Amino acid sequence: MDPKKDYYKILGVSENATDEEIKRAYRRLAKEYHPDRHGGDKAAEERFKEISEAYSVLGDPQKRREYDMLRKNPFMGQGGFGFEGQRPGGYRVHFEGTGFDNIGDLFSNLFGFGGRSRARGMEDLFGGDFDFEDLFGRTQTRAARGSDVETRITIPFELAANGGETVITSGTGKKIKIKIPPGIESGKRIRIRGQGAPGPGGGEPGDLYVRINVAPHPEFERKGNDIYSNAYINIAQAILGTEIEVRTVDGKKVKLKIPPGTSGGKIFRLPGMGIKSDTGKGDHYVRIHITVPQHLTPEQLKEFKEWARKVGLQF
């Protein structure tokens, strides 16, 4: 997620766009810039990646809220207070991203000790025998299991259908590679043992739960383990029959015979060409749409009318 990028502008929607408007915009743009349609065009490929990145954030309600907050508050996430290292009886506080190395520096700035040495700021405020632990108390930490952490990711349709690997950030902030099982659906969780929050006092870490959101596809629609897609043929192909090429969800291209006299809306089944998951193997269904020529000359229209009369078609 990069708050410097305008994901709304990338998808061509307003900041108040509904989830459905965002999904429609993504589908339209993903279909327009899909690499399969541009034969290795690098510019189109980069545009497709940009569109996918934008939707991976705006298409997830939680990530969208975080993105909106980061855009309105650009300094969020740049710094804060954190505990660094452990020593007997307590912790050292680290003021990350604040410009102060210790609490003395911070209080010096807040209470007007900046004209003197920073090191004396706390002594002036609390006395020469000041001890940070006297103020905040001594702490002893027992070893305990770390908390479980849940994160959400949006993955491409093909990755969800076929399975594979992707890289995410664990509960400790490091990048890890996780396996995506084939056929996973939106809303499902993947458990990664030992990758949650670190355990206090040296205890074992918790687990990481990855909630999956599957991005829509510009060509495929999923119903259970079955896949639905559309194919377009012209009038001549519908009347005379033809053979077309259909792309399946695993990236293969298979031949489909269209018999003579095929009507628009006809659905053909490709057995076993759907999603293969632990619950079974689905089929691929192809809906046929017939395209009509848009620009016919007067002579062509005349010939078509004569032909229609001969075969008994009303118009």
Image (tube, rainbow, N blue to C red):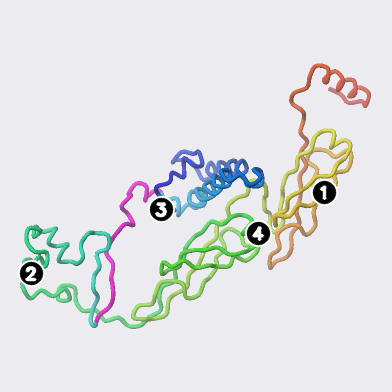
Mark 1 lies on residue: 256
Q: Amino acid at mark 4?
A: Ala
Q: Identify residue for label 4.
A: 161
SS class, disc 2: helix
**Residue 216 highlighted magenta (yes or no):** no
Dot 3 or dot 2: first in sequence order is: 3
Helix, strand or loop status at disc 3: helix
User: What is the x, y in percent for residue 243?
Assistant: 84, 44
Q: CA distance from mark 1 to mark 3?
A: 46 Å
Bounds of the magenta segment? 68-87
Q: Are marks 3 and 2 in contact (CB under 8 Å)?
A: no
Instruction: Name the residue: 7% across, 66% down.
Output: 125
Marked residue nearer the N-terminal end (2 or 4)? 2
Give the crowd class for mark 3: few <14, some 14-19, many >=20 residues within 10 Å.
some
**What residue is shown with label 3?**
66
| Mark 1 crowdedness (10 Å alpha carbons): few <14, some 14-19, many ≥20 | some
Crowd class of label 2 (few under 14; some 14 to 19; many from 20; radius 10 Å): some
At horizontal 67% and vertical 50% (from top left) the residue drawn is 221
User: Looking at the picture, how far across and down is residue 106, in whole percent?
Assistant: 17, 62
Going from N to C along the chain, the mark reached first, 2 or 1, is: 2
Q: Earlier in the sequence, mark 1 or mark 4?
A: 4
Q: Earlier in the sequence, mark 4 or mark 3?
A: 3
Amino acid found under the numbered disc labelled 1 = Leu
Asked whether the residues under the numbered discs 2 and 4 touch, taking CB atoms below 8 Å apart as contact, a structural biologist would say no
Question: Is 235 on the left or on the right of 220, as rendered?
Answer: right
Residue 123: mark: 2
Tell me the CA gap for discs 3 and 2. 40 Å
Q: Amino acid at mark 3?
A: Glu
Does 277 sit left or right of 254 as displayed?
A: left
